[in-house]
Image (spheres, rainbow, N blue to C red):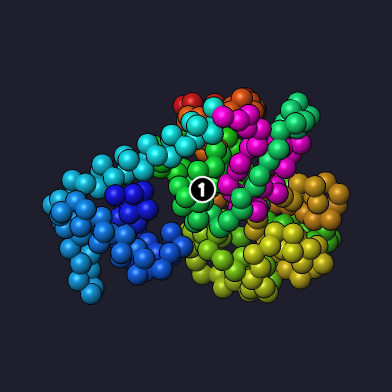
């Protein structure tokens, strides 16, 4: 047997179908089938009971699946260990979304590079729903995401949080509101610029809307995924929007936008995911830098 056969088997079980496994492994479905059939032939046992509509582990498959995962993990760990022993690794590989890279990581990287100018960074950006799979397939040392990931090879630390705010044009009718929370009734009067995807932020705003303004019909002016575009549209007077407080701080301080708190929304959380083993000296330094610079309030909340 070889590791391609083991990986095809494990991924087929994890994904629940040969077609999904083929897509994740970037192989043809027929190749995944061949790998698993050859593996069953070598073992002299049927691992999967398959029909045209379903697939389930056989008794032998349930026993072998746990060992197959262990063998794949040992293979990955040995490759990482050998690479660290044979060369000095100075690259820091991070998987995250473009939003988090831009608004949460840029300042951290600038600060870290001042202390370690020779360290290079490789950012692997993807949708939030893809982060866990990319960690598994690419073995990057680090990830930043908005929810806890379950992977025994990685540790997860809560490192930041931000509240949702309403942003408006810097216009007289909004300036007269002062610093109070944004009035709920205004959501029915103002055009709203929202996200067109089911982002974490969007889901929280929808949850809040159902609880706090169930009878108000929102007037959606545009659905946009890009944060910078949303802020430009709001500044131009196209509408208001609900967004994390982090990316709007500079625009608010420059007077381009106004920002108002919303009562009852859940904070936006950021988690740092890092590999438990086989970090180089540079990667260890970056891990320690991130963990040592967690805001005090977040650190105290995490330790409770």
- Residue 26, above or below 106: below
Q: Residue at x 80, y 56 (%)?
A: 257
Residue 55, horizontal then vertical, whole percent? 23, 64
263 left or right of 246? left
Q: Quadrant of residue 267?
A: top right
112 left or right of 269? right
Residue toward you, 207 or 108 = 108
Q: Is there any visible trace of residue 70 in the rendered image?
A: yes
Q: Circle 1 sits on which residue?
A: 138
Residue 220, horizontal then vertical, whole percent? 63, 73
272 left or right of 149? right
Over which residues does the magenta segment extend? 86-111
Examine the structure image and report whether residue 181 is included in the region drawn in magenta: no
As drawn, which residue projects farthest toward the left? 59
Residue toward you, 175 or 246 = 246
Q: How many marks?
A: 1
Residue 294, horizontal then vertical, whole percent? 62, 30
Examine the structure image and report whether residue 89 is included in the region drawn in magenta: yes
Q: Is there any visible trace of residue 176 in the rendered image?
A: no
Q: Residue at x 50, y 51 (%)?
A: 134
Residue toward you, 281 or 263 = 281
Residue 33, horizontal then vertical, whole percent? 30, 65
């Amino acid at each position: 047997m070889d590791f391609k056969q083991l990986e095809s088997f494990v991924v087929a079980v994890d994904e629940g179908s040969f077609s999904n496994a083929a897509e994740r492994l970037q192989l043809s479905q027929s190749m995944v089938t061949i790998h698993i059939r050859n593996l069953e032939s070598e073992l002299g046992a049927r691992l999967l009971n398959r029909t045209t509509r379903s697939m389930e582990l056989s008794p032998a498959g349930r026993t072998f699946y746990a060992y197959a995962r262990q063998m794949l993990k040992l293979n990955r760990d040995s490759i990482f260990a050998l690479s660290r022993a044979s060369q000095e690794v100075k690259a820091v590989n991070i998987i995250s979304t473009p939003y988090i890279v831009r608004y949460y990581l840029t300042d951290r990287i600038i600060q870290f590079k001042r202390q370690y100018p020779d360290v290079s960074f490789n950012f692997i950006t993807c949708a939030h729903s893809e982060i866990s799979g990319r960690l598994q397939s690419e073995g990057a040392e680090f990830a930043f995401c908005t929810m806890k990931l379950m992977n025994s090879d990685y540790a997860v630390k809560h490192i930041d949080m931000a509240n949702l705010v309403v942003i408006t044009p810097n216009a007289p009718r909004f300036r007269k509101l002062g610093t109070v929370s944004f009035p709920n009734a205004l959501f029915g009067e103002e055009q709203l610029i929202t996200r067109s995807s089911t982002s974490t932020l969007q889901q929280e705003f929808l949850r809040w809307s159902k609880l706090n303004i169930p009878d108000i019909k929102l007037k959606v002016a545009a659905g946009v995924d890009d944060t910078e575009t949303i802020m430009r549209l709001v500044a131009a007077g196209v509408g208001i929007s609900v967004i994390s407080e982090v990316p709007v701080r500079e625009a608010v301080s420059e007077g381009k936008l106004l920002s108002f708190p919303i009562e009852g929304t859940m904070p936006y959380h950021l988690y740092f995911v890092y590999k438990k083993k086989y970090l180089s000296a540079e990667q260890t330094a970056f891990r320690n830098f991130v963990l040592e610079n967690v805001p005090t309030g977040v650190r105290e909340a995490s330790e409770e």
